[in-house]
Structures are given as structure tokens and as C-alpha cells.
Amino acid sequence: MEASIVEEMTLATTERVPAPVQDQNKADTFVGRMLGVVNGGALALMVSVGHRVGLFDAMSSLCPASPGHISEVAGLNERYVREWLGAMATGEIVEHDPAGGTYYLPPEHAAFLTRAACPNNLAVTTQFVSILGAVEDRIVECFRDGGGVPYSAYPRFHEVMAEESAQTVLAALVDAILPLAEGVCERLREGADVLDVGCGSGRALVLMAETFPRSRFTGYDFSEEGIGKARDEARAKELDNIRFEVRDAATLDEHEKYDLITAFDAIHDQARPARVLEGIARALRPGGTFLMQDIAGSSHVHENMGHPVAPFGYTISCMHCMTVSLAQGGDGLGAMWGEEKAQEMLKAAGFTRIELKKLPHDIMNVYYVAS
């Protein structure tokens, strides 16, 4: 009996031994890539911090400067700034002159790291790394036990999504996104009824309400936090042509009520996305338009191999979009449902005309114009 146990243990141990390296160059290349992943992840956290505390904005107006001067201009603690600058310099995000002890943010880098760089500020996007990292323990539990992580576990998500949307949606909404749907802007100027499904903090809808005062706007979102912020902003701007309601989009039961329905980066998060799309189709008036922004990419992994932000897309899907849907007992569609699946579901919901359009400034999203 004892010999048998030893044999089994030996066999199990043997099975766990990694296969010998056959191609040392391949192994070395992969190790280098993994070190890049580790450093890149660390830099993402530091870039997020630098964005939140305004260091990139402060440095963009400075000539090469000492940590003390940078700290003074930014109004921050010098010890922390000095350590942050170490990460930025070794990560080749800022330039360092050891002789003078100075640090400098080149304008070519500032063009993608400062608030003035909107809609090209990639520092905004790095904030998702820390947000997702904060729920890693709960995601690990889901891998083992199933289920999902609810929206309430992501306290800054709406704040960062609003900032991200300011770049991808707000900056181009009136001049580029709405014109993707032929005739929509003219209809809005004359006066139309508009619904934004999954409106979040309502910034897109507020902008539309300001721009098209003759039209009437409604925003639905599952999040009480998001709707609260949306109402506050509408109230601050004294808009009387807009209203917001806490509502599950899957319960949409209105019939031929809206001329335009929008959904910005929202459908794939839904617990019941097919039901939401069916409700949207019913709620449109004859001749109405559904304008949906969602993640660009294919429904097939192999066709996303060259996608510039595919790993980020799958990660945010796994650690937010998919899991918040599963937490509601939903389908867990995920952010990377892809253009093929999206078109399939739009057709199943009753849309007969579907156009896919993209904007040059936005590598992350695709726009569906459906009727």
C-alpha cells in the first residue's frame, strides 16, 4: 500500500514538472515580454496616480524642473512626487537629467497625458487598472464558485466612465457621432423625443439637451449613483427638457414613443441584452433611429489578434462588464461580444437596417445605426 502511494505521488509530481525548453530564443523573448507586462502594469498605476493628482498637467507647463519645484507647482508632497518621478523616468514617460537633477515632460508625451489633450488623454484610461485590481479577490472567487461581482463593488467606476466618455463620446457627439445617423441632427433641431439607455451619469444626454432645446430627453440607468449625478448636472444647468429615472432597461415597455434612442457603451453590460434590444425596437417610432456605441472588434478571438487594445477589452470584460451581468443572474455577454454577435442580436430584436460606422479618433468603439 505504501509503495503504491509513493508511486502515485511521484507520478503526480512528475506531471507537474514543466516540459523542457525546446526553443531558448522563444523562451527568452517571452520572459522579456512578461517583464514588460509587469513594468507596464506598474506604470499604468503610476500614470493613473499622476493623472488624478494633476502632475502631468503641472509638468506640461514647466521647463526641466527639480522634484521640489514640480511638487510646489502641483501642490503635492515632495517625497511622493520624487518617487513617482523615478517610475516615470525609468519608464521613459518623462525625461531625466541626472546632472541637473531635473525632470521634463516632453510635449510629444503631454499630448497624450494631460487634460488639455482630450480626446487623446490615455492617462484617463489607465485608471481602470486600479479599479479592476480592487475587485481581483472577488473575481478570483467567481472563477472558483461562479456568480458575479455587482456594480456596487466599483465605487469609482461611474466617475471614470464619465471621464472616459467625455473623450470618446462628448468631444465628438454633436459634430461627428450624431451625424452618423442621417437626418438625426435636423430632427433634433426641429424637436424630437430621445431616450438614452444606460445613461450612466447622463453627460451625453445633458449635452444633447443643451444643444437641441426643442427636443425632449429621457435617461434610464440601473445605477442610483449614476442617476443622482445626472439629475444634479441637469439641475445645475437649469434644463427643463430632460429627465432621468432609475430603471432596469430590460423592463422597457414603451411603444413607439421615441424618434431617437441611444446607448453608449451600455448594451453589453445588461443582464438581459436581447430583451433590452427588443424593448428598444418597440419603443422607436416608425422611421426612428437606434444609435448604439459599443466595443469594436470581432466575436472571434482569432480575429482580434491584431486589435490594438484587445487584451484590455477582454480584461475589462472579465473583471467588470461580464461579471456585473452575471451578478444579476444575467447572460454575461461581456464587452467583447463583437460586431458579428451584435448584428445578429439587433436583427433578432427586429431591426432590418443596420449600418456599422467608425470614427478616426476612436480605436476602441464602433457605432451601429439601426432602424
Image: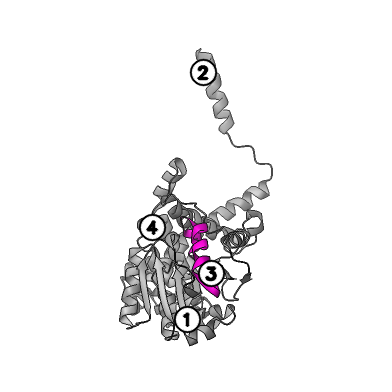
State the residue position of label 2. 5
In the image, what residue type sits under mark 3?
Answer: Gln
Residue nearest the observer in this picture, 186 or 73: 186
Answer yes or no: do the residues labelled 3 and 1 have beta carbons within 8 Å?
no
Q: Quadrant of residue 70?
A: bottom left
Answer yes or no: do the residues labelled 1 and 2 have beta carbons within 8 Å?
no
Instruction: Locate residue 170, reporting x and y percent.
Output: 47, 77
Magenta span covers which residues?
266-290
Does the rendering let one see residue 86? no
The secondary structure type at the circle numbered 2 is: helix
Local packing at callout 4 (Cα closer than 10 Å; few below 14, some 14-19, many 20+) is some
Does the rendering let one see residue 170? yes
Q: Which dot, 1 or 2, sits closer to the camera?
A: 1
The secondary structure type at the circle numbered 3 is: strand
Q: Earlier in the sequence, mark 3 or mark 4?
A: 4
In the image, what residue type sits under mark 1?
Answer: Ala
Q: Which dot, 2 or 4, sits closer to the camera?
A: 4
Quarter placement of the C terminus:
bottom right
Q: Is residue 18 magenta?
A: no
Q: Is residue 305 above or below residue 362?
A: above
In the image, what residue type sits under mark 4?
Answer: Tyr
- The color scheme shown is one colour
Q: How far apart are the alpha carbons under marks 1 and 4? A: 32 Å
Q: Earlier in the sequence, mark 2 or mark 4?
A: 2
Q: How far apart are the alpha carbons under marks 3 and 4? A: 21 Å
State the residue position of label 1. 192
In the image, what residue type sits under mark 2?
Answer: Ile
Q: How far apart are the alpha carbons under marks 1 and 2? A: 76 Å
Would residue 353 be found to the left or right of residue 125 on screen?
right
Residue nearest the observer in this picture, 255 or 147: 255
State the residue position of label 4. 151
State the residue position of label 3. 293
